[in-house]
């Protein structure tokens, strides 16, 4: 998984022994000060509710730099989705010796068409994000595409610049 | 930064993704019910799915929480690791997984449940069809 926005660039490789949790390594560059960190990450599924037409998830996310234990993060992620609608939120607090900051976001989306299994799936979304390093909320359109094991999400605003999320499932 | 950028570019590059008689038999020989009383099957779908099969069994599995293609990929991968599984198809619109088993041996319903649950979804019903 690769991620880039105005606050950081990161590359995350993880393995999920069960659907309940995943462990991995994330390399992060904090754009504000140029610092680079490698995190050992744990994501844990706190709650999942499946229905015939929807799924709701609540995750706990955490990570620590094994070289610098004073550098770590924690937070929660949640989403609810049907084949047509998506909503999600996230909170993350990053603790650093130099800069502590928080990232918050909410995201809503709609699928303009319902593709079959194996088709290209498209979501048109709106995301609002606040990074305490940059103070104000930024709201911008996001295009999410996935096909097969590939996933890509692109958002852009004048304020936040590019918000890119790429993922491949092996 | 250069390392991260290089890895991201590499990642981005790799993530650009990249009617026959048997079917009729399948419908007539739905004689092995595990818990399939509530399974709503589409005869045309079964016909198409079994068109290239020479025998064995098909499990029609109703799944809750299968709302996303990307999330359902794990189900297909899990079942394809089983050597007795000939093919797998997912119907997102009906919440169904079709699994063709290349064996006449009884299929363990609990094993199907376990594999679906391992991917984070729940099985509500299974209907077994002999091809």
Image: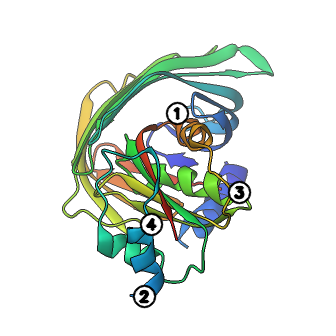
Which residue position holds label 3? Answer: B81
- The answer to whether dots 2 and 4 both sit on one chain is yes
Q: Is residue B38 above or below residue A40?
A: below
Q: What coloring was used for the rendering?
A: rainbow
Helix, strand or loop status at disc 2: loop
Q: Mark 3 and mark 2: span between their CA atoms?
A: 28 Å
Judging from the image, mark 1 belongs to the subunit labelled: A
Helix, strand or loop status at disc 1: loop
User: In percent of the image, x 31 and y 75: which residue is there?
Assistant: B44
Q: Nearer the viewer, mark 3 or mark 2?
A: 2
Judging from the image, mark 3 belongs to the subunit labelled: B
Q: Are marks 4 and 1 in contact (CB under 8 Å)?
A: no
Which residue position holds label 4? Answer: B29
Judging from the image, mark 4 belongs to the subunit labelled: B
Q: Along the horizontal axis of the image, is A25 left or right of A99?
A: right
Judging from the image, mark 2 belongs to the subunit labelled: B
User: In percent of the image, x 48 and y 76: which residue is there?
Assistant: B50
Q: For mark 3, does the 10 Å Cα neighbourhood hold few (<14), some (14 to 19), or many (20 or more) residues?
A: few
Residue A27: % across, % down: 68, 39
Which residue position holds label 2? Answer: B20
Q: Mark 4 and mark 3: span between their CA atoms?
A: 27 Å
Mark 2 or mark 4: name the one nearer the start of the chain.
2
Foreground residue, B28 or A143? B28
Count of numbered tags: 4
Residue B38: % across, % down: 30, 45
In the rendered image, the quadrant that contains the C terminus of chain A is: bottom right
Q: For mark 2, does the 10 Å Cα neighbourhood hold few (<14), some (14 to 19), or many (20 or more) residues?
A: few
Mark 3 or mark 2: name the one nearer the start of the chain.
2
Q: Is residue B55 above or below residue A70?
A: below
């Amino acid at each position: 998984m690769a991620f880039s926005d105005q606050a950081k660039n990161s590359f995350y490789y993880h393995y999920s022994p069960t659907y309940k949790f995943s462990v991995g390594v994330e390399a992060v560059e904090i754009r504000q000060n140029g610092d680079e960190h490698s995190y050992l990450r744990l994501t844990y599924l706190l709650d999942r509710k499946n229905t015939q037409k929807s799924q709701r998830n609540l995750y706990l996310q955490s990570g620590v730099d094994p070289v610098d234990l004073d550098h770590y993060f924690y937070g929660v992620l949640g989403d609810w989705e049907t084949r047509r609608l998506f909503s999600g939120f996230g909170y993350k607090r990053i603790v650093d010796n130099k800069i502590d900051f928080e990232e918050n976001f909410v995201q809503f989306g709609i699928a303009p068409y319902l593709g079959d299994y194996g088709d290209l799936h498209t979501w048109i979304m709106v995301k609002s994000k606040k990074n305490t390093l940059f103070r104000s909320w930024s709201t911008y359109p996001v295009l999410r595409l996935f096909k097969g094991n590939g996933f890509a999400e692109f958002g852009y605003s004048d304020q936040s610049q590019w918000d890119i999320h790429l993922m491949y499932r092996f | 930064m250069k390392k991260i950028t290089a890895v991201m570019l590499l990642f981005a590059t790799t993530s650009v993704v990249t009617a026959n008689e048997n079917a009729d038999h399948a419908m007539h020989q739905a004689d092995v019910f595990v818990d399939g009383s509530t399974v709503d099957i589409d005869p045309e779908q079964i016909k198409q799915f079994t068109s290239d099969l020479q025998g064995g069994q098909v499990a029609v599995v109703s799944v809750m929480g299968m709302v996303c293609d990307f999330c359902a990929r794990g189900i297909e991968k899990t079942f394809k690791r089983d050597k007795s599984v000939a093919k797998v198809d997912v119907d997102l619109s009906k919440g169904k997984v079709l699994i063709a088993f290349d064996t006449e041996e009884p299929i363990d319903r609990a094993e199907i449940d376990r594999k679906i649950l391992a991917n984070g979804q729940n099985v509500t019903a299974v209907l077994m069809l002999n091809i």
